[in-house]
Amino acid sequence: MKIIIYFFSFCCFAQIKKENILNYQKSIIEQELTGSNRGIIFQNGEVIFDQTVNSNKNGDLDINEETIFPIWSMSKPITIVAMMSLIEKGIIDLEDPVYKYIPSFKNINCKGNNSIYPCKNELKIIHLMSHRSGFGYYSNPGYGYGFTNTIKYNNLEEFISDVAKVTLEFEPGSDYLYGINQAILGRIIEVVTKKSFFEYLFKTILDPLKMNNTKFHLTDEEKLRFQPLYINHNSLKGFTYELNKLSYSIDNRAHFGGEGLVSTASDYMKFCKMLLNKGIYNGKRIISEKSIKIMTDVYSEKGIINGQLPGKKVYYGFSFFVVDPVSDGIDFSKRLYGWDGYHCTRF
């Protein structure tokens, strides 16, 4: 299901043909894969490419510096950095059982061969960090309109009360399944910090990086700068805001760390600059270099993420895809890592 609306990328390559990127941006509009889109490349301390291609189609919006995007799963790496900050402080350990912080996860069930049984393995923090918990994404009628939506939930405590009843797809730690893990981590952060998840993100990451447009809500004025989704699937074709299960209401405290944030290209570039600079931004350390190495290590050696880097072996870290320096004959100067979002943001 191709539902790309925009593209921005922050890469570090020795050489790059800028015209090829611009031609690509134009081509995905011509192929009706996307509406207006933006691409950025940051290298050696400066922006070397920043181009927006607007579709000029009815229902689309022109992209500019003030455009706000729903970044969906690109929320996950921000949540991971927040968790690593607590691990650095010794408040949380990767091997801690989740029930240490949320008791309702103590007695969990797993799916077996035509049966459900009490899980033998404890569900641990590291399983949520690496998508090895057994939780997936859910949209079937038995789970209502999915779990991560602010129409059904007003806070993370209500969300967790339902999630803890879900039967895991497999024993925790035994396999990889992309799912609602980072939304659960958001609640753990609330429990240990005694703050709302957004309050902790703001204090620890967003405010130090001056990511002023990255948050879980939109004001009325900001909604005018919010980029619509372009969808081209079966009988659905055009620009819409309707296919969204997030209200972005300032009164809603269901801050989903896996999918709930909005951001601007400039804001997210600051986050990427911090990662590239080994955890430091404008002289201020946000996270340690050791933590970055831990979260971009390989925890699952499976598959390709949604067509990302087709033809190359992609591994999974803590909500980062990881490509080794040599992959299918292509020699990168350094290990490559990043992540995608549902409406196909990418870094």
Image (cartoon, grey):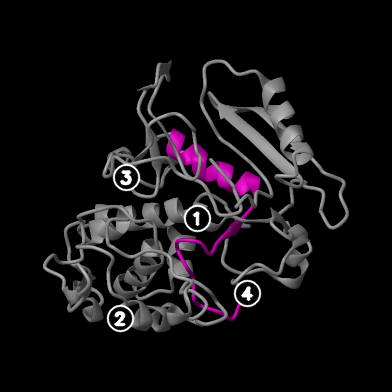
Query: Callout 4: helix, strand or loop?
Result: loop
| Disc ID at residue 73 | 1
Look at the image and give the residue range highlighted in magenta. Answer: 247-276
* Residue located at (38% from left, 52% from top): 81
Residue 100 position within the rendered picture, expressed as x and y whole percent measured from the top left: 19, 73
Query: Callout 1: helix, strand or loop?
Result: helix
Residue 325 position within the rendered picture, expressed as x and y whole percent measured from the top left: 37, 23
Q: Between marks 3 and 1, how big is the CA–CA gap?
A: 16 Å
Q: Between marks 3 and 2, how big is the CA–CA gap?
A: 28 Å
Q: Which three-letter amino acid code belongs to the residue tagged 2?
A: Lys
Q: Where does label 4 land, which residue?
A: 247
Nearer mark to the viewer, of 3 and 2? 2
| Disc ID at residue 165 | 2
Queried whether the magenta region covers residue 300, the answer comes back as no
The answer to whether 325 is drawn above or below residue 153 in the figure is above
- Mark 4 vs 1, N-terminal side: 1
- Mark 2 vs 4, N-terminal side: 2
Q: Which three-letter amino acid code belongs to the residue tagged 3?
A: Met
Residue 145 position within the rendered picture, expressed as x and y whole percent measured from the top left: 52, 77
Q: Which three-letter amino acid code belongs to the residue tagged 4?
A: Ser
Q: Is residue 33 left or right of residue 1?
A: right
Disc 1 crowd rating (10 Å Cα; few below 14, some 14-19, many 20+) is: many
Query: Callout 3: helix, strand or loop?
Result: helix
Q: Is residue 72 left or right of residue 90?
A: right
- Mark 3 vs 2, N-terminal side: 2
Q: Which one is in front, 193 or 312?
A: 312
Pointers 3 and 2 in contact (CB under 8 A)? Answer: no
Disc 4 crowd rating (10 Å Cα; few below 14, some 14-19, many 20+) is: some
